[in-house]
Amino acid sequence: MKACYQSFITPKKNQYICLMLIMLWHSSSWAATSWSLVTTPKALGSTAQSIGSYTNGCISGASALPINGAGYQLMRLSRQRMYGHPVLTHFIQQLGERVAQEKIGVLLIGDLGQPRGGPTLTGHRSHQTGLDVDIWFLHSQQAQERLLSSAERETMQAASVVKTHSAELNLAQWTVRQEKVLHIAAQMPEVERIFVNPVIKRELCKRYNAAQWLRKIRPWWKHDDHFHVRIACPANNTHCEKQAPLPMDSGCDAGLAWWFSAEASKPAAKAQQPSLPPPLPLLCKELLH
């Protein structure tokens, strides 16, 4: 974008493209700002409803995740991204209880969504319909012994479990604890898929010999310091757009091998012409205003 602001020394065609990009960027930023300024949930009906797609939608009747619970603590409180569909907040609490019962440790919970969902200014394309949550891989001894302070929750960093400039796990950060948590989460019926770094998926395939629960563990770029849980569209949420169903196999095949190819390591080619962001569903506009 900085290059576009300097585009007046470029040919007219490039100037036009850059001016269009600048206008679109300001438009999308304004829309995200509107959603980020909302501080309370709003319900359009008697039950919570996820509206639209995971990357272009909103949430009616969101609930706030308590900042502390059995087996978990919520991080980055200042971001105010602690809201989600009740199915999502219940899932986090249930997962925390399982982790506590099995003495695995304490989960550090990152972003859920904004009070009414919608696009965010920073950090995510998804997390818009109250059905996504990031959970850190970090195992914190401090969190296991006591409640973290507000300052610690803002400054503590999620450590990567993948070696820098390498396609190998960092065994100083990766332990059987993370594997157990992923196993438990993947077996919970409301979970549709869990995004992790491809290095993590490959390690799980090696260790668990293509177990069926691995089909929900999906490789994706980054996701080396946290895993991203996505909940399926809840029952009776008629405005929630489902994703295509997952393949029935474990995903420990040639599709996984692609992630370690030269093609996968190259950034995707950028579109030559700017495109308008898709409009939010009409119900989202009603929800916002």
Image (spheres, rainbow, N blue to C red):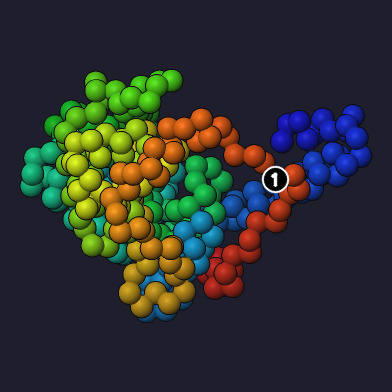
**Up/down of 135 relative to 139, above or below:** below
Residue 138 showing in the rendered view = yes
Q: In the displayed structure, does residue 111 sit left or right of residue 141?
A: right
Left or right of 62, for residue 170: left
Identify which residue is drawn at 35% across, 22% down: 163
**Nearer the observer, 41 or 161:** 161
Q: Quadrant of residue 131?
A: bottom left
Q: Quadrant of residue 198?
A: top left
Q: Residue at x 23, y 35 (%)?
A: 206
Residue type indicated by callout 1 = Ala
In this rendered view, identify the residue nearer to me: 129 or 260.
Answer: 260
Residue at image location 59% in from the left, 73% down from the top: 282
- Residue 119 vertical placement versus 241 (above, below): above
User: Percent position (x, y) of residue 238?
Assistant: 43, 77
Element type where label 1 sits in the image: loop
Where 176 sits versus 171, above or below? below
Quadrant of image for the N terminus? top right
Image location (x, y in percent) of residue 222: 43, 35
Q: Is residue 103 left or right of residue 12?
A: left
Q: Is residue 287 above or below residue 236?
A: above
Nearer to me, 73 or 184: 184
Image quarter hosting the C terminus: bottom right
Neighbourhood count class around disc 1 (C-alpha, 10 Å): few under 14, some 14–19, many 20 upward: few
211 with respect to 200 (left or right): left
At 44% from the left edge and 70% from the top edge, which residue is drawn?
Answer: 240
Judge by depth and name the residue closer to the eye, 156 or 132: 132
Q: Which residue is mark 1?
A: 271
Where does residue 140 sit, x and y in percent of width and height? 22, 30
